[in-house]
Image (cartoon, rainbow, N blue to C red):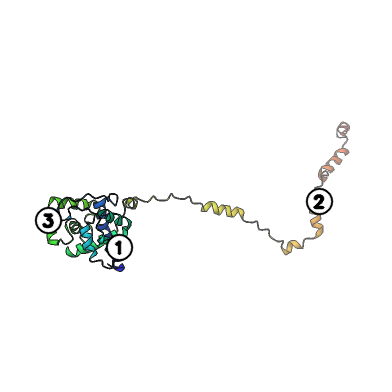
């Protein structure tokens, strides 16, 4: 598997979902990589390795189709179980490449549609299993149990060109409604009134007519008000004095 093929597979949402599901099934998402020793069958005396639970014999089969991958060749040559476990632990990207090579080979024998059920069946019972084998065995209790585990980590049914699988926290945030912003008060009338008050007072320049007013008239207008007795009242007092009413004159004095 070259770099271009690797990038194409890792960017395929279906393959990412299958990888994530297998990692959860085999090691609880990488939390438990201490796999028990197999006590029967072709893998007797060995144990699965790494986050994806790849058996040593399966590793050797995968490495045969990964001849340009130096790390895959080195891992396949390790015979000691503990050393192989340590090698997997120190080369996490190698695990991803091996898992994708497994999916690639299983998908080819299963019909080429990247069906998660068929691939997880082949993951458990052999990458050389065929679609006919799956149809024959899919209702067996052990197969149903494996498929039930798969469905816990996949959208069911998973579409052929399904969306990217979101982590649970991101999925919850994506479904949470976004709060609408609080309405803001309309300050336009207040701003308009403030602008009116702040406007400078226009002082009109004197007209040409106002400029021609005689200086004497302006000075007369500016004199203080004369507080002398009204002429009409003064004349009335003079007429009263001419009347021969001595006592009244005395009072008017």
246 lies left or right of 171: right
* Numbered disc total: 3
In this view of the protein, can residue 111 be seen by the observer? no
Question: According to the image, label 1 marks what residue?
Answer: 71
Dot 1 or dot 3: first in sequence order is 1
Q: Residues within 10 Å of mark 3 (few under 14, many from 20)?
A: some
Quadrant of the image containing the N terminus? bottom left
Element carrying mark 2: loop
Residue 116: x %, y % from top left: 21, 58
Disc 2/disc 3 C-alpha distance (Å):
125 Å
In this view, the residue in front, 163 or 138, is 138
Mark toward the start of the polypeptide (2 vs 3): 3
Looking at the image, residue 233 sits to the left or right of residue 59; the answer is: right
Q: Quadrant of residue 249?
A: top right
Q: Which mark is residue 137?
A: 3
Q: Label 1: few (<14), some or many (≥20) within 10 Å? A: some
- How far apart are labels 1 and 3 at the CA level? 35 Å
Q: Residue at x 81, y 54 (%)?
A: 220
């Amino acid at each position: 598997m070259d770099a271009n093929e690797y990038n194409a597979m890792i960017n395929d949402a279906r393959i990412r979902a299958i990888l994530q599901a297998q990692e959860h099934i085999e090691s609880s998402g990488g939390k438990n990589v201490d796999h028990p020793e197999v006590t029967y069958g072709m893998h007797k005396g060995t144990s699965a390795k790494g986050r994806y639970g790849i058996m040593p014999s399966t590793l050797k089969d995968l490495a045969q189709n990964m001849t340009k991958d130096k790390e895959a060749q080195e891992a396949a040559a390790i015979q000691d179980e503990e050393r192989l476990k340590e090698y997997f632990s120190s080369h996490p990207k190698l695990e991803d490449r091996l898992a994708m090579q497994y999916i690639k080979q299983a998908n080819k024998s299963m019909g080429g549609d990247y069906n998660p059920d068929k691939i997880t069946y082949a993951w458990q019972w052999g990458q050389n299993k065929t679609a006919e084998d799956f149809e024959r065995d899919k209702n067996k209790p052990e197969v149903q149990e494996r498929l039930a585990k798969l469905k816990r980590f996949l959208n069911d049914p998973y579409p052929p060109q399904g969306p990217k699988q979101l982590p649970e926290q991101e999925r919850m945030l994506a479904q949470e409604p976004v709060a609408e912003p609080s309405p803001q008060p309309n300050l336009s009338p207040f701003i308009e009134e403030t602008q009116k008050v702040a406007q400078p007072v226009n002082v009109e320049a004197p007209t040409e007519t106002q400029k021609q007013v005689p200086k004497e008239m302006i000075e007369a207008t500016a004199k203080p008000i004369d507080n002398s007795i009204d002429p009409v009242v003064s004349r009335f007092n003079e007429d009263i004095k001419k009347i021969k009413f001595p006592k009244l004159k005395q009072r008017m004095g």
